[in-house]
Amino acid sequence: MTTTAAGTAPAAAVPPGSSPWQLARRELRRRPAVRISLTVVVLFVLMAATAPWLGALGGWSPEEFDKSAVDSYLGGLPIGSFGGISSEHWLGVEPVTGRDLFARVIHGAQVSLLIAFAATAIVVLVGTAAGIAAGYFGGRTDAVLSRLMDLTMSFPSLIFMIAMLSVAKDVNRILLITAVIGLFGWPGVARVVRGQTLSLKHREYVDAARVGGAGAWRILTRDILPGVSGPVIAYTTLLIPGMISTEAALSYLGVGVRPPTPSWGQMIAESVAFYETDPMYFVIPSTFLFLAVLAFTLLGDALRDILDPRGGRT
Amino acid sequence: MILYLLRRTAALAGVLLAIAGVTFVIFYVLPNDPAAAACGKTCSPERLAVVREYLGLDRSVWSQFTEFLTGIFTGRTLGTGQYAVQCDFPCLGYSYENSLPVWDLLMDRLPVSASLALGAAVLWLVLGLGAGVTAALRKDTLADKTLMVGAVAAASLPVYFTSVMLIYGVIRIAGLLPYPSYRPFTEDPVGWASNLLLPWIALALLYAAIYARQSRGSMIESMAEPYIRTARAKGMPERTVVVKHGLRSGMTPILTIFGMDLGGLLAGAVITESIFGLPGIGRLFYGALVNSDQPVVLGVTLLAAFFIVVANLVVDLLYAVVDPRVRY
């Protein structure tokens, strides 16, 4: 029943005694979409992690102006075809300033992925803790936490994020965005974990541990947590593309990362005015954003099919 | 049923109250000085003091908040003496920017945002459910995989990219449609639809994927149920089996997502409205942010929260309609 719901054929010739993780890995390897999206994800992460060195390879820093690459008589449009793509500037240059697009895109990847990963980490940690506590302890703890989840989910999150970021003073912009995005994401994870915990807490092995004298902490970390980790991992992977899009949307609206720090959303916002005169400037950051979101979504979808066949519906 | 409704309405009021409180603190207490924002850039200290008193900012946060709340239900008088202004029910204050009542501003813009949201919702339901059901009935074929990856790819495109491409392709190059300018439905239904068509498509592409995925999963699950076999054995036409028995039982999770999406969108799609130049609540909100127009920001946030909680309540009530097993 569960495998049909996931839309997967049963894996052929499974050696007996395989752990769920071995099964999952085997299942993942069978899917071409997973292989492709995993490759893209790894490339993006590598690109973000090595941005300073990769940028040095290109020879330009993201904030360096190159007036010789733009035509001041043509309103600052890049010299050369395709937005000034050349051996000098691998992905062309920004109009007017002549900043190197390759350097800006890879440094933008660093900012976007850093925020997305950090916000996801906050959401998953807080959500798992809240969900496990609500599900396992029940009673008043559950009532309070569940009300808090309902309340947080009733907030118009994007509107709220935009508004909070616009009134906040400039401390550390990246930290602030991460916190604000994380603030609204945790109830989703918490709900999934709570449901899963509820179904686990009266299983025989948990009762056995309790009878054996294990304390609540030990039961939660040793018996419950491994049981909820599958859906949580699937959910986490699916959270990342949402976080990337949210960060991009906030930066696009001008309340996210502040210039001159590059971010994909902000680059796209600046390039919209040039979409007819310098289409490459608009297309390049959009393509990177699109590929990153798509790859993470496809990977997350596949993980969810395998690790959480009921799709988190409990 | 009535008891359930009463309990839910009370909970709804509580949630809105909490949201109003949090919003109030964030926008009236945390910023340096709302009075300075209200007064404008060239403001003498004496005038600033007058403005502060006029806005009631010299009083405690608590009394400001209770006054704001009573204003919503009964209306209130802003300021004193010759500056007094009567703000009628439902009073959300006055815009700092153009001194119009926030409520009037919101109601003026609501038809635009609601038209955008409802039209897009119809489109994404048709696209999403259509793709999902088609894919489920052809499970594991090439059509299934193409549809599902296509839906995810469409949703992965940033909405500002899709919007700009639609404007470029359909309006600038092909010249098929005029540049969007909102026309009220009551005056010009054809103009209304043709002006909103591109924004609808842009939004629907963003939302359809989740419906496709969810309906595909539900369909595959429910089509394997014994009652489907029974329906087929009775000699029911396949179309009726699919729609009435297969799809219907999988509607509950779809309804949940739909409520959240539509509720969240009714109070304005900030990016889409900005790109297409539609004078909706999203653009009102964005303009208010740029000008630090706190009453408008607070008003939009409350309206948005209101739509979300009401949508969730309506969805919960609809469960009973869609799924006969649900009783309240």
Image: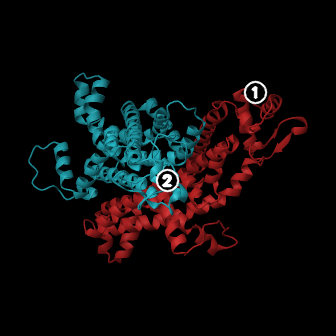
Chain colours: A cyan, B red
- Judge depth for marks 2 and 1 and give the one in front: 2
On the same chain: label 2 and label 1? no
Q: Is residue B316 left or right of residue B287?
A: left
Q: Do labels 2 and 1 touch, CB within 8 Å?
A: no
A165 and B110: which is toward the camera: A165
| Chain identity of mark 2 | A
| Chain identity of mark 1 | B
Image position of A275 with respect to A154: above or below = below
User: Measured from the top left, where is residue B200 in percent x and y?
Assistant: 53, 64
Quarter assignment of residue B149 = bottom left
What residue is at 65 percent from the left and 51 percent from the top? Answer: B284
Image position of B149 with respect to A246: above or below = below
- Residue B327 visible to the viewer: no
What residue is at 26 percent from the left and 47 percent from the top? Answer: A307
Tell me which amino acid carries mark 1: Arg
Q: Residue under circle 1?
A: B59
B10 and A15: which is toward the camera: A15
Dot label at residue A68? none
Quarter assignment of residue A127 = top left
User: Measured from the top left, where is residue B280 in percent x and y?
Assistant: 64, 57
Q: Most extreme residue toward the right, as rendered?
A: B82
Q: Residues within 10 Å of mark 2 (few under 14, many from 20)?
A: many
Q: Residues within 10 Å of mark 1 (few under 14, many from 20)?
A: few
Q: Is residue A275 left or right of residue A29?
A: right
Q: Residue under circle 2?
A: A95
User: Measured from the top left, where is residue A291 in percent x and y?
Assistant: 35, 54
Tell me which amino acid carries mark 2: Pro
Q: CA distance from mark 2 to mark 1?
A: 51 Å
Q: Secondary structure at mark 2?
A: loop
- Residue B48 visible to the viewer: yes
